[in-house]
Amino acid sequence: MREISVVSPIDGSVIARRPIAGPAELDRRIAAARDAQRDWRRTPLAERADVCSRFADAMDAMRDDIVLELARQMGRPVRYGAGEVRGLLERARTMVALAPDALADIEAAPISGFRRFIRREPLGVVFSVAAWNYPYLIAVNSVIPAILSGNSVLLKHSSQTPLCAERFAAAFERAGLPPGVFQVVHTDHGGAEHLVSHPGIDYVAFTGSVSGGQAIQRAARERFIATGLELGGKDPAYVRADADMDHAVENVVDGAYFNSGQSCCAVERIYIHRSRFEEFVERAAALVRAYQVGNPLDAETMLGPMVRGSAADGVRAQIAEALTRGARPLIGPGDFPEDVPGSPYLAPQLLVDVDHSMQIMSEETFGPVVGVMPVDSDSEAVALMNDSRYGLTASIWSRDVEHSLQIADDLETGTVFLNRCDYLDPALAWVGVKDSGRGCTLSRVGFEQLTRPKSFHFRLPT
């Protein structure tokens, strides 16, 4: 029997094994999901919302176990694990609150003798493919609004974090969700392609790499279904001359290095007005040197291992390429223990004397390193921020709100922050442009991706 083995980045031990579902098993799961969805879609929205609220309560009750499992599966330090649970609760409860308005009938202008309205109907069976780096936050973005909308859901989590998917299943079971409405599938890439191309799947929500998104598109190419794709980014931060430097340094550094930089919306490029450049990099480097790198089960650890040694080696290669092109590291070899190739434990790095010919400023890094460049004007900053094939988020750091709004209008990105970064507000649409993907999750707009409009045009009897 083929199986998934979960290798912990902490010490290389295998912490879980799960059998891989093949086509026949996946077909049975789809059939069960379709059967369950026929009844679930007729369940009143208030009852669906109650189930999702109880789901959030059940997840909250498992918080301590979730924190330890996150550390063991993907290396998140235990001091931060509860934050992901809090984020899941915020998003789930926000979507529950938004659902009545988002899913309400849309009445057309009254005409005597007629009733005309648009109703949002569930699509059917939603296949959600979630990444490992924020395994709860990513999955909840599609799972909860899909369930609220009357769909059934098949969730495939990364082979690195299958226990997170099983937590979803346990929470829904405790919440009283009818069997078959939500199911976990542990499968491989071939199984995922089988599901995407299956006529019983009505929508695919995918979070992962650009190449993964392209594979989803190829699998769906002969089907008339929508796919929601969140494919990562190379998110820039621009610190203007009028920024509150205390606030900017602390939050931009956190946005770049939190979760060892393994976030689709992490700050991966920084542009500083030249008049504040030296001040910023000096203070940022001091903060980075203060990080504690080590075992994520240790309460003092601030940066745990990357998800696997090969991922860390990919970041090492980007750093090496930048150094050969003239980049200068601000974090020296004596600031952290010896960096060993092949190890998932990677010391953070801050680079200056960088430019856009370097991968560190052009390709997604997904690790604890960021490059910093000086700029002389807002227009130069905007041009550099837009000089990317990605467009997920961007952040501006300034005291001038109105001028920042003008800058934000010119940025080619799905979300623009002012004086914050690396955060998803569930009341706002989460969307990427260019190679960061397409479609939308969260907010009331996110419900539109998981439903179809149906028009009712009734001539009333006289």
Image (cartoon, rainbow, N blue to C red):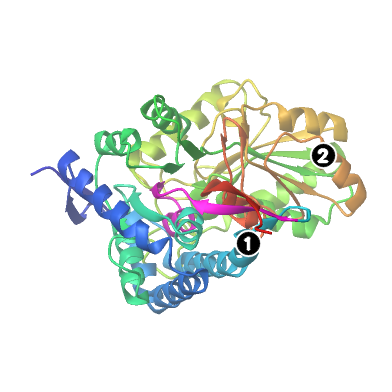
Q: Which residues are magenta?
A: 113-140
Question: Is 326 colored magenta in this rendering?
Answer: no
**Which secondary structure, mark 2?**
helix
Residue 195 visible to an observer of this rendering: yes
Q: At label 2, which amino acid type do we have?
A: Asp
Q: Quadrant of residue 419?
A: bottom right
Q: How many marks?
A: 2
User: Label 1 to label 2, Cα distance in Å?
Assistant: 31 Å
* Label 1 or label 2, whichever comes before in sequence order: 1
**Which secondary structure, mark 1?**
loop
x, y percentage for residue 398? Answer: 85, 51
Can you say whether 309 is above or below 258 in the image?
above
Q: Foreground: 347 or 447?
A: 447
Which residue is farthest left? 1
Can you say whether 445 is above or below 222 in the image?
below
Residue drawn at point x = 49 percent, y = 64 percent: 84
Q: Which residue is mark 1?
A: 104
x, y percentage for residue 25? Answer: 17, 46
Residue 424 visible to an observer of this rendering: no
Q: Foreground: 246 or 134?
A: 134
x, y percentage for residue 403? Answer: 91, 45
Residue drawn at point x = 59 percent, y = 20 percent: 325
The tag on residue 7 is none
Q: Which residue is mark 2?
A: 409
Q: Is residue 198 left or right of residue 207?
A: left
Q: Is residue 96 left or right of residue 309?
A: right
Q: Quadrant of residue 390?
A: top right
